[in-house]
Amino acid sequence: MSEHAFDKLRAIDCTFAEFTVACRQAVVIEESDVVDGVKEVVLTVAWVRPLHMVVIVDLMREEDRIVTIYEPDPRRWSSDFRRRL
């Protein structure tokens, strides 16, 4: 997880333990190809509020990196937070 992602968790008052539990129920809602891998937008609703995570799946290094975490803006996403408007 990037330092930026940890900062985002702190900013929304989500502990790492809460985030870890929420990730267990997360689902990929978007995928796009990037150099050496795939960028995923992942949704979890298992926390106090819905969260999106941007994850880079690095195929060369065989690792996943959480780039950022944010609360989706309801004006920009469908009511279930799975599709952009």
Image (cartoon, rainbow, N blue to C red):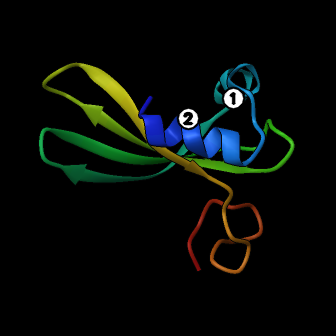
Task: Identify the residue shown where x is 30% and y is 21%.
Answer: 63
Task: Identify the residue shown where x is 51% and y is 40%.
Answer: 5
Please state the horizontal and vertical placement of residue 81, each as a whole percent of the image: 68, 61
Q: CA distance from mark 2 to mark 1?
A: 10 Å
Amino acid at the residue labelled 2: Phe
Amino acid at the residue labelled 1: Phe
Please state the horizontal and vertical placement of residue 18, each as a whole percent of the image: 76, 25
Q: Mark 1 — residue?
A: 19
* Among the 4 quarters of the image, the one containing residue 32: bottom left
Q: Decide which of 55, 31 is in the foreground and name it.
A: 55
In the image, taking residue 63 as reference, residue 22 lies left or right, namely right
Q: Is residue 44 above or below residue 52?
A: above
- Count up the numbered dots: 2
Q: Decide which of 14, 22 is in the foreground and name it.
A: 14
Q: Check contact, mark 2 vs mark 1: CB within 8 A.
A: no
Instruction: Give the secondary structure at mark 2.
Output: helix
Q: Mark 2 — residue?
A: 6
Q: Residue furthest right?
A: 48
